[in-house]
Image (cartoon, helix red, strand yellow):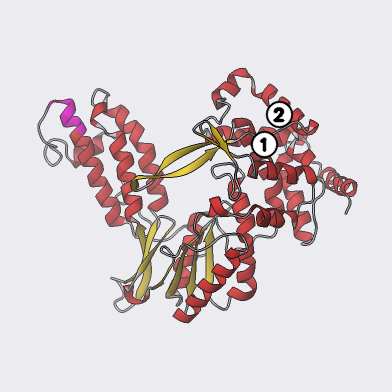
Amino acid sequence: MHAKDERDSVSADLKARSVSRAQGVDRVRALQRVLYRCAKQDRDRRFHALFDKVARSDVMLRAWGEVRANRGAPGVDGITIEAVEDSGVGDFLDVLADELRAGSYRPRPLRRVHIPKPGRPGQTRPLGIPTVADRVVMAAARIVLEPIFEADFHPVSYGFRPRLSAHHALETIRTTVNRGGMWVLDADIHSCFDEISHAALVAQIERRVSDRRVLKLLRGWLRAGVFEGGIVSAIEAGTPQGSPISPLLCNVALHVLDEAWATDGQRLGVLVRYADDLVVLCATKERAVKARELAATVLATLGLRLHPEKTRIAHLARGAEGFDFLGFHHRVRESWKRRGRWYLQKWPTPRAMASIRGKIRERTDRRLAMLPLEQVVENLNPVLRGWGAYFRYGNSARKFEAIDHYVNQRLAMLASTKHGLHGWNWTTRFNHRWVTSLGVHRFSGTVRPTTAYAGR
């Protein structure tokens, strides 16, 4: 299909459904539905006319909303979200759209920062921060490209996809193991976001996209370079980790692995992939070994490799071994209700526990003793609620109780410092009743064994 025919086809489809602002229909969502349907109906179709949709005012405005909601630090130009709001969002987006249409838009290098690894004191991971302008254009491109590739993605992929979450992946693991998948390939892709081959990634994108201006945009972001220590370094491989489009690019690249599993891997076991984190649940050790070989072979075509020290095969039967995935430790345990029956259970990993303790410690530091305790609790509760909402599904009761005790201790220490008292006083004066009276979010009693959609 030629570019003009494609534009006419999409425009006619939109008009046929009367997608106009006046009728209160979300035009961006309507565009995404049309793109998804066109891609779903013709698996070999390549889209020629996408760039004009990236620069559309409503798409750019939606992209700005996403970037603004995520906040984030400024890029190499030093321009912040607040600065854009102060100077005028409308003018900012108009200038950006004009640059795109005129072909004068150029991606800026990423600002390299090193952030602490959760639960790993002293360890950091590099993060590349695009400018606010680049983040908006990346988000706009993702809005347009995502429905096209969603039409191809397999159900084994759960990460950063519409209407899917980590808990869907975790539920698949639970049901598969309980049905006999007792051998697990616990795989770790070595530096996935940093080592993906640009050529292999672009080749995957070109299966669906032939719009030269969109491809030029993507190549520009991949090759923008990294600014660190006053020097701009070229990027030979990898995706701009931390950018709005990076998760989509990761899924597009690793779709090769999902495809291989749909054809050759199904007989080996069930693949569960969340972005670059994956496990394969197998019935026998032999199948798990072959699954590791297949995964290594497919990943090599993308310039990727399995981490030799972090990739292993675990045997779950009767709790022999366990594995960590998506923040949970998974291990088979005997049911206390039905003796002789063994089921997969999960609870927060030591890293997850260390991470929440670190955040609690930071928000109850003794330097905050001059603040009212109610203000400290107000700052602490959102962190507790967010962590608890994620880990409440499973068998986290004991871990939740431990965190409740830790919060009690930290607030008692802070209160003792505030009032000039010696010791913690958390079992006497600043006890459980006292903490509860402060309105602290409590974890005890909030655990749900399975997710709300477990029976679907």
Q: 187 or 5: nearer the eye?
A: 187
Magenta-drawn stretch contains 334? no
Does 195 sit left or right of 440 as displayed?
Answer: right
Q: Main secondary structure of the magenta part?
A: helix
**Residue at 58% of width from left, 74% of height from top?**
265
**Residue at 65% of width from left, 41% of height from top?**
221
Q: 196 or 439: nearer the eye?
A: 196
Where is residue 37? Give x, y as percent: 76, 55
Q: 290 or 176: nearer the eye?
A: 290
What is the span of residues highlighted in magenta in the rendered image? 414-420
Where is residue 352? Give x, y as percent: 36, 51
Where is residue 147? Give x, y as percent: 69, 51
Q: Earlier in the sequence, mark 2 or mark 1?
A: 2
Question: Which residue type carries mark 2?
Answer: Leu
User: Toward which corner of the image does residue 379 lie, by quadrant?
Assistant: top left
Where is residue 70? Give x, y as percent: 53, 36
- Which disc is residue 96 wearing? 2
Does 41 sit left or right of 292 as displayed?
Answer: right
**Residue at 45% of width from left, 58% of height from top?**
451
Question: Which residue type carries mark 1?
Answer: Val
Please tell me whether residue 250 is drawn above or below residue 257 in the rendered image.
Answer: above
Q: 400 or 231: nearer the eye?
A: 231
Does 428 sit left or right of 153 as displayed?
Answer: left
Residue bearing mark 1: 137
Helix, strand or loop under label 1 = helix
Please tell me whether residue 380 is drawn above or below residue 203 in the rendered image.
Answer: above
CB under 8 Å between discs 2 and 1: yes
